[in-house]
Amino acid sequence: MKVIRSHDPKALGTMAGKAAAALIRDTIREKGTANIILATGTSQFETIHQLIREDIDWSKVNMFHLDEYIALPETHPASFRKYLKERFLEKVPPLKNAYLVNGETDPEAECSRLGKLIQDHPIDVALVGIGENGHLAFNDPPADFETTRPYLVVALDAACRRQQMNEGWFASEEEVPGKAISMSVHQIMLSKHIICSVPGIRKATAVKNSLEQPVSNLYPASILQQHADCVFYLDEESASALS
Ligand SMILES: N[C@@H]1[C@@H](O)[C@H](O)[C@@H](COP(=O)(O)O)O[C@@H]1O
């Protein structure tokens, strides 16, 4: 695992977006197509902002995303589908496929549908973030490191729900859905390249635990220490607790 520090969140996002774009272009050159995972949330603003400015043949790209709330309408400001449509899909030419997680249908059937699709599209490049509680996608601690199912129905813990409220996505903690569909830790780890963008002081403890604690499902993102090609992009604030 590699760590790249930049002076501010904007520079961090620019570097992460450029790195992702280079990997996507290389993959298309080698294989003809590229399969990617995008993350959502505040931490991805600058990374995605850079990605949409890159010269990429998007018609050769298949996209998956990490997670979505169950039973949250797509019109809600916190909907991850809405986020990806408005910040990414509407800003680039049409992709080959964009496999969005639908949280408004039968969740187990949706997990199976997406699971089959992603198993047919081995992931080349995954953009991920981590939560204040160290979660990867919506795999809150203690995360399930054992399951090999690609997508899971998960319960969101209090820390995760509080973070979503504090970031302004919801007016109150009670309004945050209690459940979500999440890509599993196992599936994320199958990605060939992982780019983890983590700006901001609120993530300093989670970053320290993820990078400096022994790998443990109590710090879900600590599993990234075992990935063959994962790069953490940090700013001064998110790196401030590192030894
Ligand atoms: N479940 C989402 C993830 O998709 C995201 O990558 C991560 C970081 O979130 P944020 O960027 O809002 O801090 O946790 C969110 O809650």
Image (cartoon, grey):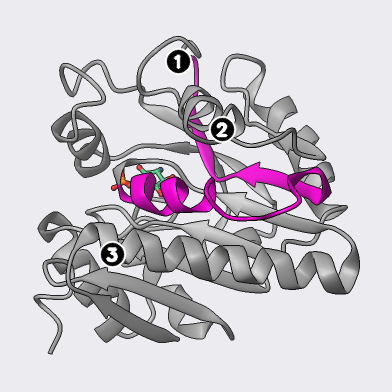
Question: Looking at this rendering, what residue extends furthest in the bottom direction?
Answer: 243
Q: Is mark 1 within 8 Å of ligand 1?
A: no
Q: Which segment is the magenta one?
A: 43-71
Place of residue 74 in the rendered image (x, y in percent of width and height, measured from the top left): 50, 14
Q: Nearer the viewer, residue 235 or 123?
A: 235
Identify the mark nearer the N-term, 1 or 2.
1
Residue sitting at 46 percent across and 48 percent down? Answer: 48
Place of residue 161 in the rendered image (x, y in percent of width and height, measured from the top left): 25, 34
Asked which quadrant contains residue 30, the reply is bottom right
Q: Nearer the viewer, residue 171 or 157?
A: 171
Residue annotated with mark 3: 11
Asked which quadrant contains residue 90, the reply is top right
Q: Nearer the viewer, mark 1 or mark 2?
A: 2
User: Label 3 amino acid?
Assistant: Ala
Q: Is residue 179 visible?
A: yes
Q: Nearer the viewer, residue 46 or 211?
A: 46
Distance Cα–Cα, label 1 vs label 3: 32 Å
Residue sitting at 9 percent across and 75 percent down? Answer: 240
In what element is the residue under mark 2? loop
User: Label 2 amino acid?
Assistant: Lys
User: Is residue 167 part of the magenta span, yes or no?
Assistant: no
**Does residue 179 lie above or below 187 as drawn?**
above
User: Label 1 amino acid?
Assistant: Leu
In what element is the residue under mark 3? helix
Distance Cα–Cα, label 2 vs label 3: 21 Å
**Does residue 202 lie above or below 146 as drawn?**
above
Residue 126: mark in rendering: none
Place of residue 184 in the rendered image (x, y in percent of width and height, measured from the top left): 58, 53
Residue 72: mark in rendering: 1
Residue annotated with mark 2: 91
